[in-house]
């Protein structure tokens, strides 16, 4: 009797990994959907929400995104308490929502309503996963943005009435161009009452292009992080025991066999969830001598060690995407977690995330400048630590002379203070407090370094040891001569 003729039952509490389950994440396409009148984001049009659902299960990715979002939000700013829509949201609320989506998707969107003069007088943050471009024109540009709260039917917020996306229930909103607003609502039968306003849609990939989320480049490590956490949970619940094959001459649905399976499972792990696969209907000859056959090592220490190494690798790669300093990401560093190290890390990451804050500031100011909100612009600030090591609301450069946005474009005419700033970055790189990418970015942005200058200043311990060895060999040759 071949194995294909056997009946199988499994006793497992883990959802197995299937690559095709994550195809929407690993193979992103933009595809025209004539039926809906939109451009799909992903093969099945539910890529962004699928990515969010996965990241929220990742012990490393979710904190990394939240950390970046916090720095994009920045400290307090003038006008943050001004109410800007009928729901009572303030400019602070608008900036915060934009920062969250920018950190996650490298994109954000704000919908604006208008007064009779064609001025924006109401703004609402729109979540990126709920938006799709309408069908592109001949130049591959979108003129409208389609809104539906649950395009992929996989939103974590479930409503009593499930409404699938159709062309009729997708709300299409004009792209942001306030100079055309009055013209747009004047031609409508009920004017402003029928007007859906406009949407300012920022994408780091460019106009009429879906953004490429920062975590997309390391999506396999994010999936690995999720699967690793499932493995740890499964092994914990089963007591780190081996996996077994239970062999029996009984039929797979025989009550005696089922009772035996349940009894074995109840003896394993904290929750009595075992790891048994049953092969039933065997003949006496096929049974051999063993009833249970071990198919796993069952070494708890080996499993924990492998899971820990996988977690550390995943975390290092995932946080590296955002250039988060090790201290802020909880990665162990040789200097520990002193207040000075945290302050320095905040300085570094404020410099790295400055462009994100400027992007939010610039786009929000487009609406404020054209609108009637009682304020023409905002200026976002960075965040820092207060004297007790807690988070401060507002920020000033802790050491202004070491500002990472210095105007130097060459390495000439550096002040002594600026030279100390360069040396400080190099020291932190040598101590492992900054990665090579972070140190390189700070030297280029703050002090005008080019690639060659960066290579001259950032010398790893391995390179230094190699140079010392070469110098020693050279001196030895000279002595011999």
Image: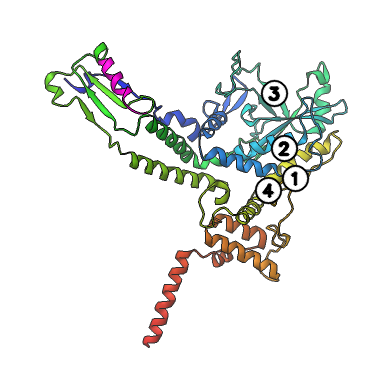
- Residue 380: mark: 1
Asked which secondary structure carries label 2, the reply is: helix
Disc 1 to disc 3, C-alpha distance: 31 Å
Residue drawn at (66%, 33%), measured in percent from left and top? Answer: 141
Of helix, strand and loop, which mostly describes the magenta segment?
A: helix
Name the foreground residue: 266 vs 230: 266
Task: Mark 4 or mark 1: name the one nearer the start of the chain.
Answer: 4
Q: CA distance from mark 4 to mark 3?
A: 30 Å
Proximity of marks 4 and 1: CB atoms separated by less than 8 Å: no
Cα separation between marks 4 and 1: 11 Å
- Which quadrant of the structure image shows residue 166? top right
Residue position for label 4:
355
Mark sitting earlier along the chain (1/3):
3
Secondary structure, mark 1, is loop
Residue farthest toward the bottom in the current orientation of the protein: 481
Q: Which of the two residues, 223 or 399, is positioned nearer the viewer here?
A: 399
Q: CA distance from mark 2 to mark 3?
A: 24 Å
């Amino acid at each position: 009797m071949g194995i294909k003729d056997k009946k199988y039952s499994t006793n497992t509490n883990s959802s197995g990994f299937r690559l095709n389950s994550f195809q929407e994440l690993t193979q992103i396409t933009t595809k025209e959907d004539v039926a809906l009148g939109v451009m799909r984001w992903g093969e099945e049009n539910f890529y962004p929400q699928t990515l969010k659902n996965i990241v929220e299960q990742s012990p490393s990715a979710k904190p990394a995104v939240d950390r970046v979002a916090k720095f994009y939000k920045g400290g307090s700013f003038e006008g943050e308490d001004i109410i800007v829509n009928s729901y009572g949201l303030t400019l602070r609320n608008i900036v915060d929502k934009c920062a969250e989506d920018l950190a996650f998707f490298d994109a954000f969107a704000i919908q604006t309503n208008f007064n009779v003069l064609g001025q924006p007088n109401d703004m609402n943050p729109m979540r990126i996963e709920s938006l799709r471009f309408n069908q592109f024109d001949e130049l591959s540009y979108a003129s409208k943005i389609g809104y539906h709260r649950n395009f992929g039917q996989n939103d974590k917020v479930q409503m009593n009435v499930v409404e699938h996306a159709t062309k009729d229930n997708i709300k299409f909103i004009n792209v942001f161009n306030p100079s055309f607003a009055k013209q747009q609502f004047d031609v409508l039968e009920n004017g402003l009452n029928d007007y859906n306003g406009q949407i300012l849609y920022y994408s780091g990939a460019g106009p009429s292009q879906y953004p490429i989320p920062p975590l997309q480049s390391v999506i396999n490590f994010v999936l690995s992080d999720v699967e690793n956490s499932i493995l740890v949970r499964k092994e914990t619940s089963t007591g780190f025991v081996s996996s077994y094959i239970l062999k029996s001459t009984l039929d797979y649905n025989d009550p005696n066999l089922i009772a035996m399976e349940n009894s074995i499972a109840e003896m394993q792990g904290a929750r009595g969830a075992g790891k048994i696969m049953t092969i039933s209907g065997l003949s006496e000859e096929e049974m051999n001598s063993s009833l249970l056959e071990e198919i796993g090592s069952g070494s708890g220490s080996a499993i924990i060690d492998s899971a820990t190494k996988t977690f550390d690798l995943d975390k290092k790669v995932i946080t590296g995407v955002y250039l988060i300093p090790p201290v802020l990401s909880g990665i162990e560093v040789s200097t520990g977690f002193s207040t000075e190290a945290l302050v320095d890390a905040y300085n570094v990451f404020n410099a790295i995330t400055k462009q994100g804050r400027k992007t939010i500031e610039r786009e929000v100011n487009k609406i404020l400048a054209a609108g009637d909100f009682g304020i023409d612009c905002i200026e976002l600030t960075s965040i820092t630590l207060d004297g007790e090591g807690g988070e401060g609301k507002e920020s000033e450069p802790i050491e202004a002379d070491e500002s990472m946005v210095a105007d130097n474009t060459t390495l000439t005419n550096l002040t002594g203070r600026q030279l100390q700033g360069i040396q400080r970055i190099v020291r932190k790189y040598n101590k492992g407090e900054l990665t090579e990418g972070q140190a390189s970015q700070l030297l280029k942005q703050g002090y005008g370094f080019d690639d060659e200058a960066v290579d001259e200043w950032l010398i790893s311990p391995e390179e230094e040891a190699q140079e010392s060895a070469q110098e020693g060999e050279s001196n030895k040759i000279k002595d011999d001569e």
